[in-house]
Image (tube, helix red, strand yellow):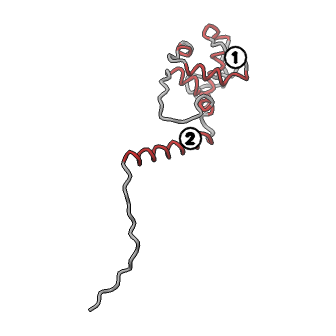
């Protein structure tokens, strides 16, 4: 009686990676994919102008500052999108955006933030978000 010949294949040696390496690799892949989606996306562009790089860091912004940066708050421009406000404009007939209320609206003159020239708006917005307390926007809304 002869035994059937086994096919001899080279054996693979698998060495499992430590869990921490696998976890770090998955985290890096997820951040890379998230960054690609953030760079190529069409939503959240006002926030993108301030935070271009995704990450797990918490910015500890106040609620008012988040509303100002994202435009998601009690602003006619935002509410109009969902049919919750009859017009897209402020009471002074200008577009009812957070930027308008913070810098130009005559009805909120006492709360205005000093804004620089148009070519420096991105740097101005970043300086607002880098302030530790976010008090500059706390009074505005």
Query: Is the C terminus in the top left, top right, bottom left or bottom right quadrant?
Result: top right
Return the residue nearer the eye: 66 or 9.
9
The kind of secondary structure element at disc 1 is: loop
Q: Residue at x 54, y 21 (%)?
A: 65
- Quick check: marks 2 and 1 in contact, CB under 8 Å? no
Point out the residue furthest to the left here: 1
Residue 36, x across and y down, in percent: 58, 43
Instruction: Characterize the local packing of mark 2: few (<14), some (14-19) or many (20 or more) Cα atoms within 10 angstroms.
Output: some
Mark 2 and mark 1: Cα distance apart in space = 30 Å
Residue 118, x across and y down, in percent: 73, 21
- Residue 60 bears which disc, if any? none
Return the residue nearer the eye: 95 or 84.
95
For disc 1, the marked residue is 116
Depicted 120 relative to depicted 20: above or below: above
Query: Is the N terminus in the top left, top right, bottom left or bottom right quadrant?
Result: bottom left
Depicted 135 relative to depicted 70: above or below: above
Q: Is residue 20 left or right of residue 110?
A: left
The kind of secondary structure element at disc 2 is: helix
Depicted 137 relative to depicted 31: above or below: above
Q: Residue at x 54, y 12 (%)?
A: 139
Q: Is residue 80 left or right of residue 61?
A: right
Residue 13, x across and y down, in percent: 38, 63
Depicted 32 relative to depicted 107: above or below: below
- Residue 35 bears which disc, if any? 2
Return the residue nearer the eye: 137 or 101.
137
Residue 28, x across and y down, in percent: 49, 44
Q: Residue at x 70, y 19 (%)?
A: 94
């Amino acid at each position: 009686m002869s035994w059937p010949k086994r096919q001899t294949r080279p054996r693979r040696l698998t060495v499992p990676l430590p869990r921490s390496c696998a976890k770090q690799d998955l985290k890096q892949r997820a951040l890379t994919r998230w960054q690609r989606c953030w760079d190529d996306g069409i939503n959240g562009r006002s926030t993108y102008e301030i935070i271009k790089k995704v990450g797990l860091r918490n910015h500890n912004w106040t609620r008012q500052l988040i509303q100002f940066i994202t435009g998601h708050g009690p602003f006619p421009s935002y509410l109009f999108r969902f049919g919750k406000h009859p017009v897209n404009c402020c009471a002074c007939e200008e577009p009812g955006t957070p930027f308008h209320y913070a810098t130009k609206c005559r009805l909120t003159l006492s709360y205005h933030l000093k804004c620089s020239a148009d070519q420096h708006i991105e740097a101005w917005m970043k300086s607002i978000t880098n302030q530790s307390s976010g008090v500059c926007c706390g009074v505005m809304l």
